[in-house]
Amino acid sequence: MDLAEKLSFSERHLRRTFDRELGLSPKEMLGIVRFQSMLQELYCGTYSSFTDIAMKYGYYDQSHFIKNFKRYYGMLPKQLSKTD
């Protein structure tokens, strides 16, 4: 069951409500939440490699992970490990 069904909204109504209230689509919001969860795990140090954590959080390959990391965090993953 998806979010629209759980809320008894049509998908269109859900998208419009997200856009009006948050300025984001549900998909964009999910990406942000997923990234924040992943970032928390990175800071806790409970991962073995960036590739492993990318796969755990549903990225199909490392290039998508790197692209989203830079989009949301403003730097590459390897730059984060150098700042620790």
Image (cartoon, helix red, strand yellow):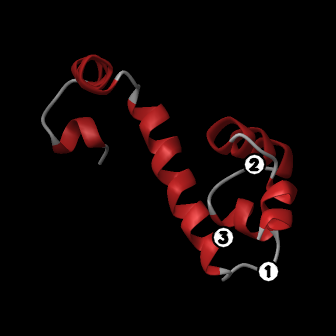
Instruction: Give amino acid for label 1.
Output: Ser
Q: Earlier in the sequence, mark 1 or mark 3?
A: 3
| Image-quadrant location for residue 10 | top left
Q: CA distance from mark 1 to mark 3?
A: 10 Å
Q: Report whether residue 51 is seen.
A: no
Residue 65's tag is 2
- The residue pinned by badge 1 equals 48
The 10 Å Cα crowd at callout 1, few under 14, some 14 to 19, many 20 or more, is few
Give the answer, above or below, for where 50 lies relative to 66.
below
Q: CA distance from mark 3 to mark 2?
A: 13 Å
- The nearer-to-camera label among 3 and 2 is 3
* Residue in front for this viewpoint, 68 or 60: 68
Give the answer, above or below, for where 55 lies relative to 71.
below
- The residue pinned by badge 3 equals 42
Residue 14's tag is none
Q: Earlier in the sequence, mark 1 or mark 2?
A: 1
Residue in the image at 55% along x and 68% along y: 40
- The nearer-to-camera label among 1 and 3 is 3
Q: Report whether residue 40 is seen.
A: yes
The 10 Å Cα crowd at callout 3, few under 14, some 14 to 19, many 20 or more, is some
Q: How many marks?
A: 3
